[in-house]
Image: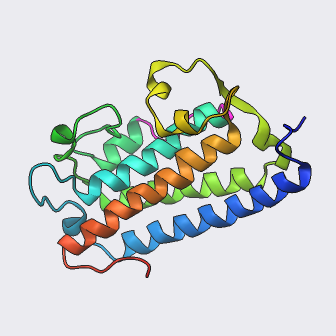
């Protein structure tokens, strides 16, 4: 059943737009990782400035983790990936301080890129299989638990709670753009250009 604000046609247009925007976002990350080396990604500028390694791992691992809430599917990330990629801080850092996360480094950069592509591929495949009406499904009802209540997505949520559309928009698309902005700025610190004009 659709809400008064939506219709099957509107949902179909929204889903089509989401699919295209998220593919475009993923292409920016692909361009970024293939035009940086591990030293640039792990570059430590100064205290208070997280390295590109943080932004990259954080967004990919958070998208991976969000699949559990959105689809019921466990994350790809497991002990084997953790050993392979060898993050210096084996955590996406959402509940950690900047002071802790300035120490984030990627050990196996090629391994990280493989993990990123697996997460992005799964995301795109899942979105391609959604029905437009799925966007109206409520994922998290109000009142929100503490770990959700302080997020940007809680500010976006409607009266009932967070719909699947809210989650995809906030947790994947908008969150991904936010961290791509960090990466673009940080690329300048290591002598690289931005990703788009």
108 with respect to 144 (left or right)? left
Its colouring scheme is: rainbow
Seen from the viewer's position, the closer of residues 37 and 55 is: 55
Q: Which of the 4 image quarters holds residue 16?
A: bottom right
- Name the residue at 62% across, 35% down: 157
- Considering the image in quadrants, where does the N terminus appear? top right
x and y percentages locating residue 44 in the rendered image: 13, 58
Query: The magenta stretch spans which residues?
Result: 71-78
136 with respect to 124 (left or right)? right
The number of numbered badges drawn on the structure is 0
Indicate yes or no whether the magenta region holds residue 73. yes
Seen from the viewer's position, the closer of residues 97 and 36 is: 97
- Name the residue at 32% across, 37% down: 91
- Name the residue at 69% across, 44% down: 165
Seen from the viewer's position, the closer of residues 107 and 10 is: 10
State whether residue 131 appears in this view: no
59 with respect to 121 (left or right)? left
x and y percentages locating residue 138 in the rendered image: 72, 30
- Name the residue at 52% across, 71% down: 27
x and y percentages locating residue 70 in the rendered image: 64, 36
- Considering the image in quadrants, where does the C terminus appear? bottom left
Query: Where 149 falls versus 50 (above or below)?
Result: above
State whether residue 40 appears in this view: yes
Query: Where 151 falls versus 30 (above or below)?
Result: above
Main SS, magenta region, reads loop
Q: Which of the 4 image quarters holds residue 137?
A: top right
Query: Where 8 falls versus 16 (above or below)?
Result: above
Indicate yes or no whether the magenta region holds residue 44. no
5 with respect to 82 (left or right)? right
């Amino acid at each position: 059943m659709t809400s008064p604000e939506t219709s099957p046609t509107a949902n179909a247009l929204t889903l089509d737009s989401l699919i295209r925007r998220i593919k475009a976002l993923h292409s920016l990350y692909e361009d970024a990782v293939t035009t940086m080396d591990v030293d640039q990604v792990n570059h430590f500028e100064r205290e208070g400035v997280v390295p590109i390694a943080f932004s990259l791992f954080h967004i990919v691992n958070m998208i991976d983790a969000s699949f559990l809430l959105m689809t019921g599917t466990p994350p790809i990330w497991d002990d084997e990936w953790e050993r392979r990629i060898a993050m210096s801080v084996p955590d996406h850092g959402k509940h950690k301080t900047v002071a802790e996360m300035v120490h984030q480094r990627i050990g196996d950069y090629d391994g990280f890129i493989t993990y990123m592509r697996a997460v992005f591929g799964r995301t795109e495949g899942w979105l391609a299989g959604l029905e437009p009406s799925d966007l109206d499904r409520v994922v998290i009802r109000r009142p929100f638990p503490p770990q959700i209540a302080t997020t940007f997505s809680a500010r976006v949520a409607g009266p009932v709670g967070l719909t699947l559309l809210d989650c995809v928009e906030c947790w994947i698309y908008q969150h991904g753009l936010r961290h791509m902005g960090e990466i673009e700025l940080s690329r300048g610190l290591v002598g690289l250009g931005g990703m788009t004009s």
